[in-house]
Amino acid sequence: MIDESNPAGRLHKILSSAKKQPDNQKVKVVWSKALGVEENDIVVTKSVIELYSLSQEIQSLIKMNDNLNHELYLSSFNRIDMAFFPLNLATTWQGAKNHLTDEALTRLQFCAQELSGFYSEETLSDEDLADIIKKTDDLYSSLYSSTLPSVLRLTLLEEVQRIRNAISLYQIKGAKGLKEALQGAIGAVVANQEELKKAKSDNDEVIKKLGGLLEKVDSFASKALKIHKIIKSPISFLIEKFSSNNEEAEDESET
């Protein structure tokens, strides 16, 4: 049984799925099916780039263990990376597929087994992901039609889109991608705390939705990665607290 809760296990699952695709299938179609993304040139290209990044991450993790024979574990990664690039979405799959040899996938399986000793995360259920997607789409629509100041609205829309992207890449990046997107969104809230406080009375429902999404993502990411939650209090409370702290600091500097 291959541990699919670490980077090597996730890559092995994706590549095994791709390897099963017919030789005469177009490259774009193969990656679309294996990655579970829409059959769009830009989307597929971005996803394959993320796959390459995942490959690099696995190699770095293996190299961190000086007790391993790095040549034994990593010698097939050059072939694996050649299945990604050069990326010609219009060609048939046979050429790229030839690089996904049984030996390469077996070595990748060994990497997954080795990483399972210190790196694992709990896989989120389809229901959990569907809930985040629903809340993300709802918040994006609410932000778009809100009366928040234009710059603030655009900033928050960008952060929500990053969460969307992390969800779409969950099969590749796991909960780590969600955590990174969450950290960026919280940073945007902190950086724009004054503007959010001023806009709260007219956009209270939108800010509640923002807080609800961030708290939900935080809960899922912390559960999957087995770490403490980042958000200890509701976002609305944090906005008030940050603003109050800033006012107190300004008062002290004036005295």
Image: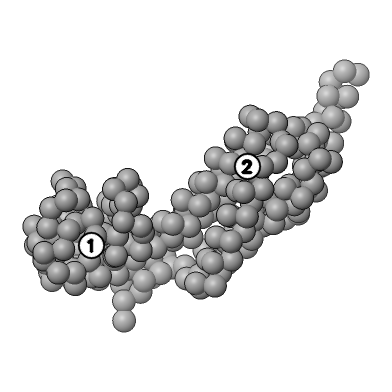
Q: Secondary structure at mark 1?
A: helix
Q: Is residue 134 visible in the rendered structure shown here?
A: yes
Q: CA distance from mark 2 to mark 1?
A: 34 Å
Position of 115 with respect to 212 (left or right) is left
**The C terminus sits in image quarter:** top right
Report x, y in % for residue 25. 16, 63
Query: Can you name the residue that lies furthest to the right here?
Result: 255
Q: Can the viewer see residue 65 in this picture?
A: no
Quadrant of the rendering where the N terminus is positioned:
bottom left
Q: Which residue is mark 1?
A: 30
Residue appearing at x 23%, y 62% in the figure? 30
Tell me which residue sits at (53%, 51%) in the image.
163
- For image coordinates 36% across by 71% down, the residue present is 4
In the rendered image, residue 184, in percent from the top left (x then y), is placed at 56, 43
**Label 2 environment density (alpha carbons within 10 Å; few <14, some 14–19, many ≥20):** some
Kind of residue at badge 1: Val
Q: Is residue 214 above or below residue 16?
A: above
For the residue pair 66 and 207, the one nearer the viewer reads as 207
- Of label 2 and label 1, which has the lower sequence position? 1
Disc 1 crowd, CA 10 A, few/some/many (<14, 14-19, 20+): many
The kind of residue tagged 2 is: Tyr
Discs 2/1, front: 2
Rendered image quadrant of residue 173: bottom left
Which structural element holds mark 2?
helix
Residue 154, image x and y in percent? 60, 35
* Quadrant in the picture for residue 39: bottom left
Picture coordinates of residue 152, whole percent (x, y): 66, 33
Residue at figure coordinates x 32%, y 51% from the top left: 40
In the orientation shown, which residue stands out farthest toward the bottom? Answer: 1
Q: Which residue is mark 2?
A: 144
